[in-house]
């Protein structure tokens, strides 16, 4: 027999309403079911438990909570040997200014690229933030899920050339080293370029160029249609599952699994180096670079400024190993 006991796990006080992806109105009572299950036969599947979140409920025109986030600034990490332009030939300079990165007072984070130059390829600023925590990890036999509700920048056509919004994760060993990519693993949960209303999911791993993960392209879903993703909020999610064989990374858009990578698509060492550790999460809107360049280029004189990516929430869940028959589960 199984009993489910609802438990409130953190979150800011008070409800917030109105997101496209919210149902039944409740916004900050983050409720997850804690399962107490004793079985005589079969295997008990553990429940997803919320481990961390940011609901972006700060006052209007305030920066992010620096207990949760670090600001990346400039055009690279600045270490000896670190590439400029964030290694991807982006043209913007990232800032911590509330002109570029701010909470809007309506429960959203806004990351806004701004152009201040007569030269279309220079004078851009934008925002890029990373979670302070680097320990978001799937334990052996368990799973990790990272999801966010995001509205991509609402711009398209020639006006969008160069826009590159993204939600992604980097392996914890990258922080402080910055030269061990792609072996430490990068999981791109959501990317779009040039206002195509698309979704790309990608794993970067192994060595480059080439290598077991086809770098510097990575193992990718390719371009997937993301209808309405620039005009409304949609939920982007990955699950790194170490409780199945072979292990998997699964990509979801609004709950639909659209891409999966199995661990046996690469050698065991490459997979372990890319996944068997903690991760940190990154949100940014880049301008220009190699990826937009592959889909028409930009920015150009037609590219317009000040169109933000809006983030409703970011949440991290974990699930423990499945329990063998006869075991009592409680979390």
Image (cartoon, grey):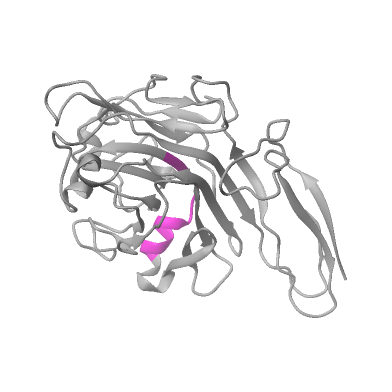
Q: Nearer the viewer, residue 215 or 239?
A: 239
Magenta part of the chain = 269-282
Residue 219: quadrant of the picture: bottom left
Q: Position of residue 243 (x, y in %)?
A: 59, 68
Whether 18 is drawn above or below 41: the answer is above
Please report the residue visible at 19 percent of the width from the left and 33 percent of the height from the top: 91
- Residue visible at 49% across and 46% down? 233
Q: Is residue 30 above or below residue 294?
A: above
Inspect the magenta stretch and tell me whether residue 207 lies in it: no
* Residue at 33% over, 25% down: 73
Q: Look at the image and tell me in which quarter the N terminus lies.
A: bottom right
The answer to whether residue 314 of the structure is visible from this angle is yes
Residue 82 visible in the picture = no
View extreme (bottom): residue: 41
- x%, y% of residue 221? 34, 64
Q: Is residue 274 magenta?
A: yes
Residue situated in front as seen by the camera: 28 or 35? 28
Residue 118, image x and y in percent? 12, 22
């Amino acid at each position: 027999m199984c009993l489910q006991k609802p438990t409130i796990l953190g979150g800011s006080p008070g409800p917030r309403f109105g997101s496209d992806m919210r149902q039944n109105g409740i916004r900050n009572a983050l409720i997850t079911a804690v399962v107490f299950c004793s079985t005589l036969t079969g295997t008990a599947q553990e429940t997803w438990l919320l481990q961390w979140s940011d609901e972006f409920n700060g006052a209007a025109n305030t920066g992010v909570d620096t207990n949760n986030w670090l600001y990346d600034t400039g055009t690279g990490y600045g270490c000896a040997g670190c590439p400029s332009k964030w290694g991807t030939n982006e043209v913007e300079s990232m800032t911590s200014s509330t002109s570029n990165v701010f909470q809007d007072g309506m429960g959203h984070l806004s990351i806004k690229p701004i152009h201040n130059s007569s030269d279309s390829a220079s004078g851009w600023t934008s925002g890029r933030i990373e979670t302070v925590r680097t320990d978001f990890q799937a334990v052996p036999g368990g799973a990790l899920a990272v999801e966010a509700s995001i509205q991509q920048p609402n711009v398209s056509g020639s006006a969008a050339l160069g826009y590159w919004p993204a939600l992604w994760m980097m392996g914890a060993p990258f922080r402080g080293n910055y030269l061990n990519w792609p072996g430490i693993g990068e999981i791109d949960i959501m990317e779009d370029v040039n206002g195509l209303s698309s979704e790309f999911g990608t794993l970067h791993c192994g060595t480059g160029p080439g290598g077991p993960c086809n770098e510097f392209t990575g193992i990718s879903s390719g371009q997937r249609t993301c209808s309405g993703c620039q005009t409304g909020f949609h939920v982007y999610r990955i699950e790194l599952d170490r409780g199945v064989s072979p292990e998997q990374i699964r990509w979801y858009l609004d709950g639909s699994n659209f891409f999966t990578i199995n661990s046996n698509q690469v050698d065991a060492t490459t997979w372990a180096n890319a996944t068997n550790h903690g991760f940190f999460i990154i949100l940014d809107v880049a301008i220009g670079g190699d990826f937009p360049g592959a889909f028409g280029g930009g920015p150009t004189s037609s590219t317009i400024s000040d169109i933000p990516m809006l983030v409703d929430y970011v949440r991290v869940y974990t699930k423990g190993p499945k329990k063998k028959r006869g075991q009592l589960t409680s979390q």
